[in-house]
Image (cartoon, rainbow, N blue to C red):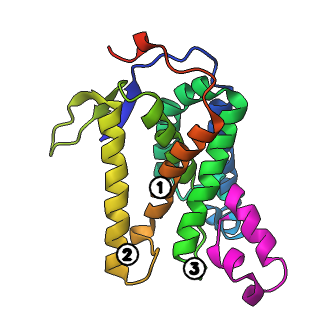
């Protein structure tokens, strides 16, 4: 299912969400200008688990690069579709979570979820030398927070059915629950199929998605929303 919009109006200007979106697009433009799909930037600033967990074997500076990659990797993407998919989810769900948390705490939730998501994937594959890039883990944290804050919201989504693409309005709770279960199932299948903990099937770090979603829920409880959504916005 591809979300197109939700039914909850935001009461504040989502400054941080828009800034993150602009930063991701700007960095992707830099990747294109760098040539070769921005591979040099990915190699330098992607999150490489071995740099963090086996830094002694990789030489001086590896640990620092691993720490930097936890943050920098959130703004790098593997291609246009990767970027577009992430930004679509951030655009739809991010404004309402920022509205509930406020700008500063939303940024903390976003960055914290991204870091914890990358760490979970890294813990499962600590020897991996493959750079991990993308905002998916951080955005999964936003989805986790939305899941708790707006369970009765409605999400208008496009459902591919063979040659038909009907628009369906579903509860946000159901949409996000199905999304999470899909990530968990794909991650579990990757573990079984690969025989190596944490391996990413098809280049997708599924456990970063799972970890980000869980981190978003946990961080929401710690950060405490400044206001709960008004009941009149919950049911359309």
Specify the principal SS of the magenta part: helix
Residue 209 colored magenta?
Answer: no
Question: What's the distance in space between the residues labelled 2 and 1, CA to CA?
Answer: 15 Å
For this view, does 23 lie left or right of residue 99?
right
Labels 2 and 1 touching (C-beta < 8 A): no
Q: In percent of the image, x 62 and y 38: which residue is there? A: 21
- At 53% from the left and 40% from the top, the residue drawn is 142
Report the residue that reaches farthest toward the top: 232
- Mark before the other along the chain sequence, 2 or 1: 2
Residue drawn at x 46%, y 50% as measured from the top left? 81
Q: Magenta span covers which residues?
A: 46-71
Q: Position of residue 17 (x, y in %)?
A: 62, 32
User: Pointer 1: residues within 10 angstroms few (<14), some, or many (20+)?
Assistant: many
Q: Which residue is mark 2?
A: 191
Mark toward the start of the polypeptide (3 vs 2): 3
Q: Position of residue 224 (x, y in %)?
A: 62, 32
């Amino acid at each position: 299912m591809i979300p197109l919009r939700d039914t909850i109006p935001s009461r504040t200007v989502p400054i941080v969400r828009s800034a993150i979106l602009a930063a991701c697009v700007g960095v992707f433009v830099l990747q294109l200008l760098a040539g070769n799909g921005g591979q040099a930037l990915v190699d330098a600033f992607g999150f490489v688990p071995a740099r963090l967990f086996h830094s002694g074997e990789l030489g001086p500076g590896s640990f620092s690069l691993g720490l930097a990659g936890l943050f920098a990797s959130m703004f790098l993407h593997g291609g246009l579709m990767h970027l577009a998919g992430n930004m679509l989810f951030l655009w739809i769900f991010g404004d309402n979570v920022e509205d509930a948390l406020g700008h500063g705490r939303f940024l903390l939730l976003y960055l914290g979820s991204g870091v914890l998501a990358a760490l979970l994937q890294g813990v499962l594959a600590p020897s991996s030398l493959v750079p991990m890039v993308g905002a998916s883990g951080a955005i999964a944290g936003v989805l986790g927070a939305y899941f708790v804050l707006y369970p009765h919201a409605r999400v208008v989504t496009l459902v591919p059915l063979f040659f038909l693409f009907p628009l369906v309005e579903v509860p946000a709770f159901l949409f996000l629950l199905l999304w999470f279960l899909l990530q968990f199932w794909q991650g579990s299948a990757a573990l079984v199929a690969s025989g190596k903990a944490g391996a990413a099937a098809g280049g997708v770090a599924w456990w970063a998605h799972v970890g980000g979603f869980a981190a978003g829920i946990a961080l929401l409880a710690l950060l405490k929303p400044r206001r709960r959504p008004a009941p009149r916005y919950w049911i359309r």
